[in-house]
Amino acid sequence: MRIDGSRPEPAVLDRMLPPLASRGPDHEGRYLNGPVALGHRRLSVIDLSHASDQPWVDEALELALVFNGAIYNYRELREELRGRGHVFVSDGDTEVVLRAYAEWGEDCVTRLHGMFAFVVWDGRRRELVLARDRFGIKPLYYSQTASHFRFASNSQSLLAGGGVDRCIDPVALHHHFTLHAVVPAPRTLLCGIRKLPPAHVMVVNAQGRDRVHAYWELDARTPDGPASEWEWAELVREELREAVRRRRTVADVPVGVLLSGGLDSSLLVALLAEHGGGDLLTFSVGFEDHPHERGSEFEFSDQVAERYGTRHHKIHIPNHEVLERLPEAIDHMSEPMSGQDAVAFYLLSERVSEHVKVVQSGQGADEVFGGYFWYPLMGRAQGSDLERFRQYYFDRDHDEFLRLADASCHGPDYTAALVAERLRRARADRFLNRVLSFDVTTLIVDDPVKRVDNMTMAWGLEARVPFLDHRLVERVAGMPPEYKIRSQGKHILKRIARGLVPDAVIDRPKAYFPVPALKYVRGEFLEFMRDILDSRACRERGLYRRDYVDALLADPEHQLTRLQGSKLWHLAALELWLQRNLDGITP
């Protein structure tokens, strides 16, 4: 949108749409009116006809919409809106979002049940209205200068549009290297790109003035409802069943499951089978073993697939392919990520997209139900909320960050201040529930959730996450933490799964999506990272202190974060993202 009184240039859309093509391979549409130019790339999942192509425009109402996501209660909303006099000309959720805005204005977001990022041009008010779902499952980035306001689903589109301040934000850099690549909204690593926080609405008028407000907040205080463990288990069982059912039935294409072999995805398969999950497609990926860690979980996923007779696909990725394809995965990261399983999701999604357009995935279960090893450790620790949190979660303390980063990026302990404030603001009367609330509303957004969205949408594959159904999370946020962290984590889920999922899957130690070569760095992977960090681009950028880099290169396998991530990979991943997205450097 132009905010300087001139008209938008169609050539800008020409540059911004190609970086979004993989997210929406089925249709491209444009809309230009006055100061506004909207572009959209569509992935057809609900209402496959051209009636739901975007931008979706109602000339009589002077409204135009671009929308990304899935609204699971769109059929109920459509009937309610029909009762209020609205006439529909399509069968999808896109038109429902537009007419919901026409009926309720900005408040329409409180009625949407699903994952979404949308922007409405309200011609009568001369305003852009931007909104993002409660857990930020769908991304929404923006940039603003004296002449324009632009938005997109990834940073690459905004960079292609031009005019973006590419300087590194020192506050964001501190978060990135302390919270394992999480930079909480509204910041990103680039000063000129920001992102709308989850559960927020932003309104920008034709002069560029904006207002932002939250429309939802998680309440994790102890409720008056369920008391016994059995009551909690029954509540969770019913809410999760409904969340899984909606994410399968609200689609006009087949829906598969990413079956890792862990409890979460295995439970999704079991509950889908309860709802008549015949002919269910499941997908697992595995990598080469490492002396210290296995590279696949096929022995567990095989048991689940066999038990429920799914059409199962096992995908094995050799190490050389991981290394060869890493730069591609980096290219599809809207922001730099250091999670070692990003490339795993990228390569898995490529194969899965050959069979389905939509999958269910288990992201969110650990954050909602207390599945990670550090939660009990925090619970037993002493001190303030911040002290208990930081000693088990921060990748680096502030002193180490100062040894890592160039002096131009130094400042106070930005991350400690942010975490202390977020934990203080959490609406919870138990420490662990404050931590889980902070995790599910802030940290998860820019780590596993963003990672899965980016890597699946790189192949036009939509990932749906039932464990982040907002009704489910609202119901269990205040559950006594002992029901979550008992049994080495996710106690309530394990109780529900007993009898549905093989005991071997339930009782196994907590595992992670393994890509051992990016954790225990040696051989070709070490040389790959050395080349990045010793490159002329890295040295001239001057972001890292060389003595810190040299120390990591000298002993990479023993330089791990508190959460067992490779510190060397953290540095190499960021530098590689900067080289490919800012410098245009390709091998």
Image (cartoon, rainbow, N blue to C red):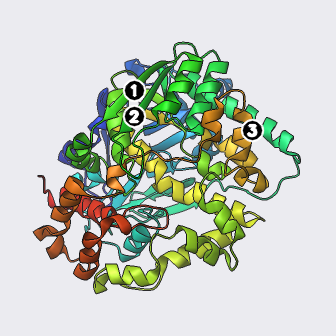
Write the residue at 29% across / 63% down: 574
Q: Is residue 452 left or right of residue 470?
A: left
- Write down the residue under mark 3: 495
Determine the image quadrant of residue 159: bottom left
Query: Closer to the N terminus: mark 1 or mark 3?
Result: 1
Residue 198 position, x and y percent, is 53, 54
Q: Is residue 228 left or right of residue 111?
A: right
Q: What residue type is labelled 1?
A: Lys
Residue count near mark 1 (Cα–Cα under 10 Å), binned few <14, some 14–19, many ≥20: some
Of 385 and 392, nearer the camera is 392
Q: Which mark is residue 41?
A: none
Q: Residue 314 carries which label?
A: 1
- Alpha-carbon distance for marks 3 and 2? 27 Å
Write the residue at 68% across / 24% down: 83
Residue 99 position, x and y percent, is 55, 33
Query: Closer to the N terminus: mark 2 or mark 1?
Result: 2
- Write down the residue under mark 2: 285
Q: What residue type is labelled 2?
A: Val
